[in-house]
Image (cartoon, rainbow, N blue to C red):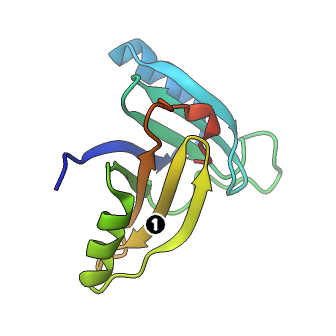
Amino acid sequence: MSETRIEHLNMNVINPERTANLLGRLFGWRIRWQGPSAMGGRTVHVGTTDDYLALYCRAVEGDDPEFDGPGPGGLNHVGVLVDDLDGTEARVREAGLVPFNHADYEPGRRFYFEDPDGIEYEVVTYRAGKGRSPEARDD
């Protein structure tokens, strides 16, 4: 099995920009991408070239009269970067887990699964030579 590492964590926050700016000041991280989330709401990616936190808010405070906070829990999913997506998916299935929400997007492919505790994982791989383009990411 090749080396696998955490690529990102997707977290619920009240104000993604405020949190990203704070983390930038504290840790020297930069905003890699920001914009509307595929899930509705807004996301800001803050971190390094290799890994990041996806700071998600289902609505931006002040923009939505129904805004009632960032949503339940703090963690949406853990993003894991792998070299062999198909091999990893086979192991996920062998463990009795069910992959879902497959996507093929530039620059890579992904799927999700939940572990027995209900924690969601996004497993992602990038095409060789394509590099990493956080702008192409949904979360």
Q: Give how far across and how far down residue 75 sits, in percent.
A: 42, 55
45 lies above or below 23: below
**In the displayed structure, would residue 77 be above or below residue 117?**
above
Q: Is residue 56 left or right of residue 42?
A: left
Point out the image quarter for the N terminus: bottom left
Give the labeled residue for mark 1.
112
Q: Which residue is more in the foreground, 79 or 41?
A: 79
User: Which residue is farthest front?
Assistant: 129
Instruction: Give the side of residue 31 with respect to residue 41, left or right.
Output: left
| Vertical comparison of 34 with 8: above or below | above
Q: Position of residue 59 (x, y in %)?
A: 72, 48
When asked about the image quadrant of residue 8, the answer is top left
The residue shown at (51%, 74%) is: 100
Residue 19 percent coordinates (x, y): 51, 29
| Residue at 37% in and 13% down | 28
Q: Nearer the viewer, residue 26 or 44?
A: 44
- Neighbor class of circle 1 (other Cα within 10 Å; few <14, some 14-19, many 20+) is many
> Disc 1 residue type?
Tyr
Secondary structure under tag 1 reads strand
Tell me residue 79's x, y (percent). 39, 51
Q: Locate residue 34 relative to residue 47 in the image: left or right.
A: right
User: At x 78% / y 39%, what residue is drawn?
Assistant: 62
In the rendered image of this protein, does residue 98 appear above or below residue 37?
below
